[in-house]
């Protein structure tokens, strides 16, 4: 733990949606949260030390990511070089004009590459770069996958779906490789959660969700927190579905 007994989380995609809920959850539980997103820190955010703990980064840009890693490692030095959790939450799901899903025939290749950079390569680059700090704390990693990684989804495009399927596979690979270092690696696969990433028409999917409603961001944040807590000390290589039973 940090000098003052606090645990530290590095969280990507912290500025809205599920990431924003995770900041609220971990902060309420007393963690220091280093937040990463493309936007500068929003002064309207109420949590203390928020501005001091924010790292502005474009995960699609290798140079920006490299600079962010150096910055994060410096900031972790202040806490004894320990990182208790890395949550790879940032994700993009590009749409065609008019909101249509880009499929495997019409997705422009540069879009496909950009999606993989943010949704798939950034998580493993961050995890490798922060391995020593995670090892020092015997910490854990949570990768945010998606229900779209396991089935064709009416609104998620092919690049997004394949990046999430790859991330689920990467989670298993990482559980095998990071586990011997004392670092647990798990995934959380949300279904239809009320955030800005959802497309118009998502409400029509509710009839296929056994619990009969969309999920909320705190329900995902609570699951992420569980996986990063000591309560999940023997959970490694799991992917928890948070989707009201939509996958069954
Ligand atoms: N909502 C759902 O129903 C749902 C379902 C399945 C899976 N998921 C997954 O859950 C995660 C969070 O989803 P969400 O709905 O909360 O998404 P969201 O509301 O669209 O937020 C996405 C976050 O990612 C950040 N981000 C995007 N591109 C980035 C980049 N290039 N560099 C750095 N940060 C970037 C955004 O911050 P900036 O714009 O400030 O950069 C934002 O904080 C994603 O991985 C998503 O695929 C969501």
Image: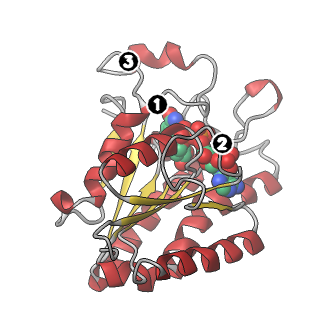
Residue 93's label in the rendered image is 2
Q: In 3D space, how far apart are the residues under numbered discs 2 and 1 (Cα atoms)?
A: 14 Å
Helix, strand or loop under label 3: loop
The answer to whether marks 2 and 1 mark residues whose Cβ atoms lie closer than 8 Å is no
Say whether residue 116 is visible.
no
> Ligand 1 lies in which image quarter?
top right
Q: Nearer the viewer, residue 248 or 57?
A: 57
Sequence order check: which comes first, mark 2 or mark 3?
A: 2
Q: Position of residue 218 (x, y in %)?
A: 38, 35
Q: Would the CB of label 2 be found within 8 Å of ligand 1?
A: yes
- Residue located 31% across and 85% down the image: 181
**Quadrant, the C terminus:** top left
The answer to whether marks 2 and 3 mark residues whose Cβ atoms lie closer than 8 Å is no
- Residue located 65% across and 58% down the image: 118
Residue 213's label in the rendered image is 3
Q: In 3D space, how far apart are the residues under numbered discs 2 and 3 (Cα atoms)?
A: 22 Å
Nearer the observer: mark 2 or 1; the answer is: 1
Q: Quadrant of residue 66?
A: bottom right
- Residue located 38% across and 55% down the image: 187
Q: Nearer the viewer, residue 222 or 77?
A: 77
Say whether residue 189 is visible.
yes
Q: Would the CB of label 1 be found within 8 Å of ligand 1?
A: yes
Residue 95's label in the rendered image is none
Sequence order check: which comes first, mark 2 or mark 1?
A: 2
Q: Is residue 44 left or right of residue 95?
A: left
Question: Is residue 75 shown above or below 12?
Answer: below
Q: In 3D space, how far apart are the residues under numbered discs 3 and 1 (Cα atoms)?
A: 9 Å
Residue bearing mark 1: 193
């Amino acid at each position: 733990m940090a000098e003052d007994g606090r645990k530290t989380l590095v969280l990507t995609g912290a500025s809205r949606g599920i990431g924003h809920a995770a900041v609220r959850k971990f902060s309420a539980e007393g963690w220091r949260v280093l937040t990463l997103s493309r936007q500068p820190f929003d002064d309207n955010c109420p949590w203390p030390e928020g501005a001091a703990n924010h790292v502005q980064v474009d995960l699609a840009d290798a140079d920006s990511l490299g600079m962010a890693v150096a910055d994060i490692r410096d900031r972790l030095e202040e806490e004894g070089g320990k990182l208790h959790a890395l949550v790879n939450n940032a994700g993009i799901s590009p749409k065609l004009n008019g909101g249509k899903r880009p499929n495997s025939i019409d997705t422009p290749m540069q879009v496909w590459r950009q999606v993989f950079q943010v949704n798939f390569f950034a998580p493993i680059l961050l995890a490798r770069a922060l391995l020593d700090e995670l090892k020092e704390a015997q910490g854990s990693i949570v990768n945010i996958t998606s229900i779209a990684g396991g089935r064709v989804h009416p609104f998620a495009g092919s690049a997004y779906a394949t990046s999430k399927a790859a991330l689920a596979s990467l989670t298993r690979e990482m559980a095998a490789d990071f586990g011997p270092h004392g670092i647990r690696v798990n995934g959380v696969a949300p279904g239809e959660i009320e955030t800005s990433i959802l497309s118009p028409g998502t409400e029509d999917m509710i009839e296929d969700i056994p619990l009969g409603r969309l999920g909320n961001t705190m329900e995902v944040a609570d699951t992420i927190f569980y996986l990063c807590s000591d309560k999940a000390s023997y959970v490694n290589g799991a992917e928890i579905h948070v989707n009201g039973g939509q996958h069954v």
